Image (spheres, rainbow, N blue to C red):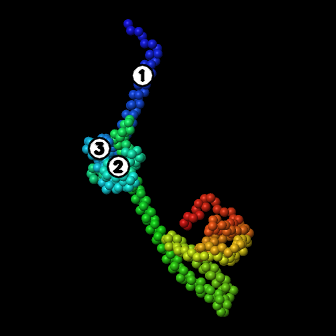
Amino acid sequence: MSPLPSLSALDALAKADGIEVKRQEALLKTGALQTAILTSENFSIIATDEKGIIQLFNVGAERMLGYMAAEVVNKINPSDIHDPQEVMARAQALSAELATTITPGFEALAFKASRGIEDIYELTYICKDGSRFPAIVSITALRDDLGTIIGYLLIGTDNSVRKQVEVALKESMAVAEKANLAKSDFLSSMSHELRTPLSAILGFAQLIESGTPEPTPSQKRSVDQILQAGWYLLDLINEILDLALIESGNLSLSLEPVSLAEVMRECETMIQSQAEKRGIAVSFPELDSPIFVNVDRTRLKQVLINLLSNAIKYNTEHGKVTIKCVGLTPGRIRICVEDTGEGLAREKIDQLFQPF
């Protein structure tokens, strides 16, 4: 009669059995995972040997490309189902990028992966029936325990939907750009058409204002209203014309040396009446020495007048507006306009430079 195993031996056997059970469970899980991957219809999975000959062609690849696995396994390499012109272009691009000669064909697809470089590319797959679709493909080199390449794994997905969205987006942008240009052309044409009769109206109103005999007080009030509204409308038309020029890219700047003090004095004269009506104190800088800046004189005045007008318009009653000139770096100067108004809320600031 053989002796009974010791308790330690039984423990060892139990542990060994437990390890074996866990190993079997892990193998089953791995097998189930591999089966799920290989039977996935959402991705084409193609495995090759080290020479590039297809060894595995999963259900997803069959569905996408129209070939049965038996038609391609051990018969062709993946470059045979890619657009040949794109494969050739890829070979040329990689040859230039990596400073080595890469031949068109499977080498062009697998070269980076064979060097351990991550490679995800976009090329066109050609189906069995001749139809084509863009695909995003990730290719990885498969290696044995010694690090020797034993094959390649290509995982691809149909990129048609994203391409269609890109095309639709480009078409939408082209339509929007065309509409924007049409709008700019319309604004420009309309503004020119409005300026001609408006100039005539302003001219006649000025003649009446300075004519002989002088207009009656009632006529004078009417003429003043015509001139005030006319000049305001002319300013709006000029701003619309500027907007059209900016949007069309045709706004030209005439740069010249300009006395900053002289521009400041002109701006002070132009906004003085508006400031006095609201009781706003406007403080311009006292420039210690002559400063000349290389700018478009008209545009500089336009920007300053717009900033000053807004600072006065949206200020508190009897508030203050301060203009400062600050030297940033040699050859550059910053002009700041500060006011005592409430300012803009954060959400309004984000919208400040939005068209209309």
Outermost residue on the bottom side: it is: 212
Contact between labelled residues 3 and 1, with CB atoms less than 8 Å apart: no
| Mark found first going from the N terminus, 2 or 3 | 3
Q: Between residues 105 and 247, which one lies in front from this camera angle?
A: 105
Find out whether the residues at labels 2 and 1 contact each other: C-beta distance under 8 Å: no
What residue type is disc 2 on? Leu
Q: Which residue is mark 1?
A: 17
Judging by the rendered image, the residue that carries numbered circle 2 is: 109
CA distance separating discs 2 and 1 = 46 Å
Front disc: 2 or 1: 2
- Quadrant the C terminus occupies: bottom right
Q: Residue at x 57, y 64 (%)?
A: 353
Q: Report whether residue 243 is seen.
A: yes
Q: Position of residue 297 (x, y in %)?
A: 60, 76
Q: Which residue is painted at 65% across and 87% down in the image?
A: 209
Left or right: 275, with 84 as reference point: right
Question: Three-letter amino acid code at disc 1?
Answer: Asp
**Residue extending furthest top?**
1
Disc on the earlier residue, 1 or 3: 1
